[in-house]
Image (cartoon, rainbow, N blue to C red):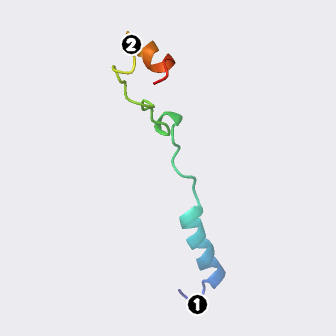
Amino acid sequence: MTHSEKPEDTAEAARHARFGKLPERVRPEDTTEETPASTVDPARDRYDDDDWLIRNVAP
């Protein structure tokens, strides 16, 4: 710092160097990621002939 520069000028220059411009724009496509909620389970959708027995007949 020289005698001609004031401390306020130095602080202002430092703020301007750090905050003087906006950050780069982020596209909305870059902010989201699509992933499946759960994996596909083929056994879940399989039909079971005896399913009604398990659900409706008390042991």
**Residue position marked by numbered label 2 in the rendering:** 50
Q: Amino acid at mark 1?
A: His
Name the foreground residue: 14 vs 59: 59
Residue drawn at point x = 51 percent, y = 48 percent? 24
Residue 42 position (above or below residue 33)? above
Answer left or right for 41 relative to 34: left
**Residue position marked by numbered label 1 in the rendering:** 3
Q: In the structure shown, which secondary structural element does the residue marked by tag 1 occupy? A: loop
Residue 4 sits in quarter: bottom right
Locate the C terminus and report the quarter of the image it occupies: top left
Answer left or right for 35 relative to 20: left
Residue 45 sits in quarter: top left
Q: Position of residue 42 (x, y in %)?
A: 33, 19
Residue drawn at point x = 56 percent, y = 72 percent? 14
Residue 2 position (above or below residue 47)? below
**Is residue 6 shown to the viewer in this render?**
no
Q: Residue furthest right?
A: 8
Q: Nearer the viewer, mark 2 or mark 1?
A: 2
Q: In the structure shown, which secondary structural element does the residue marked by tag 2 occupy? A: loop
How dense is the environment of label 2, judged by Cα within 10 Å: few (below 14), some, or many (20 and up)?
few
